[in-house]
Image (tube, rainbow, N blue to C red):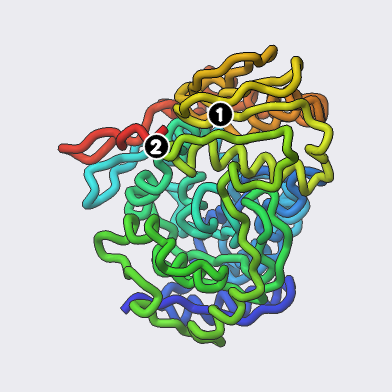
Amino acid sequence: MTSVYVASCERYDPDVIAGHVRAASAALGVPPSAGDVLLQPSLPWTHPRYAPDAHTAPAVLEGVARACEGAAVSIGFGRAGYDGLARRIDARLLAFDEDHHRDTPSPGTGASFPLPATWLDASFRVAVPRLSGSTYLPFAGALRLAYNLLPADVQLAEQHRMSDVIAGLTEAAPPSLIVVDAISALHRGGELSGEPVDLGLLIIGTDPVAVDLACAAAFGVPESELEFLRVAGQSVHPGRLSDVEILGDLSAADLAERGRRVQRIDPRPEAADLPTQLKVFRSPRASQSGVAGSLREALAVLARAGISLGKARESVLVIGPVEEVPPPGSDTAAIIFMDDTSRATYKGYTRIVRLTGRTPSVWRVLMDVPFVLNIANLRADLGFGFALAGLRGRIARVLGGPGSPRGASRRPSTPKGGGPAPEQG
């Protein structure tokens, strides 16, 4: 039976966290490496106003590093205060999006994935996600973090079929150890917009599906919603929490009790609390992990930042192919088609906007939608930083030297005999 270690940990104390990681490693039979250790934290984005908590707490990374005493530690990504942490624990900072990527087979699935060379070459890999809500999946934990190993452009291209891609990733270069930061998880929002909720937990294991089953219980997600875990666990992974041995301080019942503290976001953008002049029309075939999830996250980011939609221009946002959109009540109304699959019959709209691409990123939604709605110009706040990050990655690819993700734009291959997932939007 696969085991997961659950520790009761109420505060971000690196020494206490290190003790829990050592105890868990011993119980799981996975002693921390004294060689080359690479830590992968959650870090989709961080910004003091728009995404203040969207990262693994530095104290958790420091605790994991201390548990790997004598190891040469590296941390993937270099933001969210990790620069100071890296100096304190003498760790290197690595940017996976500027790394060389190698096609990596997924045993038993017939698929392969471009993954960072530094991740593949590390002697001991530790995934350190922060447990959070998500607008793409029922929650974000170990499997969601694995998706972030893919090059950014591949992540975007495959986002609408995220669950299927994650299923193959579970077998391609899995972590040696997973330490989930659930001391203070993120709820009432998604991975960027979530607000802290104290759960007082570290969830530690080696099997990402088993770890996520424990995370689901701690986040209050019923097993009936865990189809993405069942897809990922089709081979040798447990199918439900009762198939997992819970070690450590707490039981499965304790996890469920902590899960009652969590308030989960409704991920559907059409269910968001919108003023009457804003409407979302969504095709029932539009994937939740596509632009629907990105729009819902963007709306939650705006709400958390205190940006009101109350005075927005009358607008209709269309996701996927829908039937007729009713005419507007004003002569300044806008209709926004959220991706290349979005279409509708309409008349009377004076401003017509289309976000291009199969799945426009949440950053693109944040740049364009508030601007069209005439409520905020996030381009002024965020545009330069996004442009600089993109330019840095493109330069690394063009130069083609060490750290260049050659072939990063390639899609993960599909299993033999299969093909791309059916169009969902």
Q: Amino acid at mark 2?
A: Pro
- 2 relative to 260 in the view: left or right: left
In the depicted structure, whether residue 86 falls above or below residue 17:
above
Nearest the camera: 262 or 91? 262
Q: Amino acid at mark 1?
A: Val
- 403 relative to 382 in the view: left or right: left
Nearest the camera: 194 or 32? 194
Residue found at the far left of this picture: 417
Characterize the local packing of mark 1: few (<14), some (14-19) or many (20 or more) Cα atoms within 10 angstroms: many
Along the polypeptide, which appears first: circle 1 or circle 2?
A: 2
Instruction: Look at 42% across and 68% down and name the residue there.
Output: 223
Is label 1 in a helix, a strand or a loop? strand
Residue 399 visible? The answer is no
Residue at the spot of label 2: 114
- 183 relative to 3 in the view: left or right: right
- All told, the count of numbered labels is 2
**In x, y percent, where is residue 82?**
72, 51
Per the model, the C-alpha gap separating discs 1 and 2 is: 33 Å
Characterize the local packing of mark 2: few (<14), some (14-19) or many (20 or more) Cα atoms within 10 angstroms: many
Instruction: Look at 34% across and 32% down and name the residue there.
Output: 423
Residue at the spot of label 1: 318
Nearest the camera: 68 or 135? 135
The quadrant of the picture occupied by the C terminus is top left
Which of the labelled discs sits on residue 154, or is there none?
none
